[in-house]
Structures are given as structure tokens and as C-alpha cells.
Amino acid sequence: MTASGSMLGSSAKAVACAMGALVIGSSVGLAAGDTTAGQQVFATHCSVCHATEPGVNKIGPSLAGVFGRKSGFETGFDYSPALKAAAITWDEQTLDQFIKNPGDDVHGTKMFVSLPSSGDRQNVIAYLKTVTP
Ligand code: HEC
């Protein structure tokens, strides 16, 4: 009786654990980032200047495949010397820092739009991870 009771307890815990892992796994990497919300943020805050199709440069460079890439590497886009020289590898942390305040992060960058809400940044970064070329 006692033995089966505790076995039930531990298997219920294992199920809860597996569900927790599933929830984290479904948000494409960043624990708190939501790709659907991120797509909305992108549409309202970034898409004026950035496309997510490869090779489509607007006021800003295409952001297709930007995650994991070095700064200033989209072919055919005329970057500021500052961003090229910065040679940042774009990951969760570097993107967060840049989008929070581009001019502060990279002095002389041509991007002057910032995203002050950290939740918005996490979501948009989660979304950027999904826009691979
Ligand atoms: C007003 C236009 C404008 C808006 C809006 C804008 N950007 Fe930019 N972005 C730029 C420009 C211009 C550059 C190139 C900067 C340079 O060369 O210094 C850039 C560069 C970048 C880069 C570096 C790309 C690379 O290839 O190294 C990232 C990442 C980026 N923007 C993300 C975003 C995100 C995310 C948003 C929305 C929150 C956003 N941008 C909104 C104009 C904009």
C-alpha cells in the first residue's frame, strides 16, 4: 500500500517533468520567447525596414538567417562601417543588447530604432531564429 502509493507519486512527478520539458522545447530555444508574438512585434516594429526573405534589402538588410551570422554580412547591403567593424555574432544576448539600444551598442550604426520592452525583444529574437534562408 505504502509502496504503490509512493510509486504513483513519483510517476506523476515524471509526467509533470516531461510536460515542462515539452513546453520549453516548443518555444524554439529561448525559454521565454514566443515566436507568434515575436512575428507581431516584427510586423509592427521592424518590417518597415527589414524583410525576412533572403536577399531583400530595404532601409535595413534582410534578416533571413541573421541569427548565428556575423554583423554586417548580408550581401548587397550598404552597412555602416561601424556595424561591419563590430563583427558581432548575433545570438540571444548580442541581439538583445543591440535592439535595446543600437546606437549605444554600436556607435555609428545606421539603425536608430530601439525596442525598450524586454518581453518584446525576447519574442522578436525567438521569431528571428525561425527566419532562416
Ligand atoms: C528605421 C529603419 C529600421 C527599423 C524600424 C529597424 N531596423 Fe534594424 N537595421 C536598420 C539599418 C539601417 C541597419 C543597418 C545598420 C548599419 O549598417 O549600421 C539595421 C541592422 C539590423 C541588424 C543587424 C543586421 C546584420 O546583418 O548585421 C539587426 C539584427 C536588426 N537591424 C534588427 C532589427 C529588429 C529586430 C528590428 C525591430 C525591432 C529593427 N531592426 C528595426 C534599420 C532599421
Image (cartoon, rainbow, N blue to C red):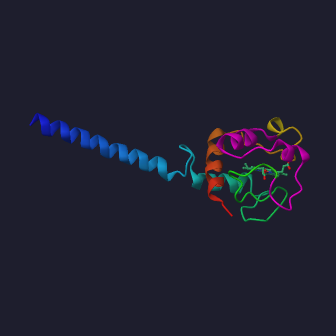
Q: Which residues are magenta?
A: 73-102
At 83% from the left edge and 39% from the top edge, which residue is drawn? 106
Q: Judge from the rendering whether residue 55 lies leftward or rightward of residue 117; answer left or right.
A: right
Instruction: Indicate yes or no whether the magenta region holds residue 57.
Output: no
Q: Nearer the viewer, residue 84 or 117?
A: 84
At 69% from the left edge and 64% from the top edge, which residue is drawn? 133
Quadrant position of residue 7: top left
Estimate the x, y position of residue 78 in percent, counting from the top left.
89, 56
Above-or-below relation of 52 to 109: below
Estimate the x, y position of residue 62 in percent, counting from the top left.
77, 59
Q: Judge from the rendering whether residue 28 lies leftward or rightward of residue 7; answer left or right.
A: right
Instruction: Indicate yes or no whether the magenta region holds residue 78.
Output: yes
Above-or-below relation of 37 to 95: below
Estimate the x, y position of residue 45 in percent, counting from the top left.
73, 51
Q: Nearer the viewer, residue 130 or 120?
A: 130
Estimate the x, y position of residue 46 in percent, counting from the top left.
74, 53
Quadrant position of residue 66: bottom right
Furthest residue in direction left, as rendered:
1
The quadrant of the image that shows the N terminus is top left
At 11% from the left edge and 34% from the top edge, which residue is drawn? 2
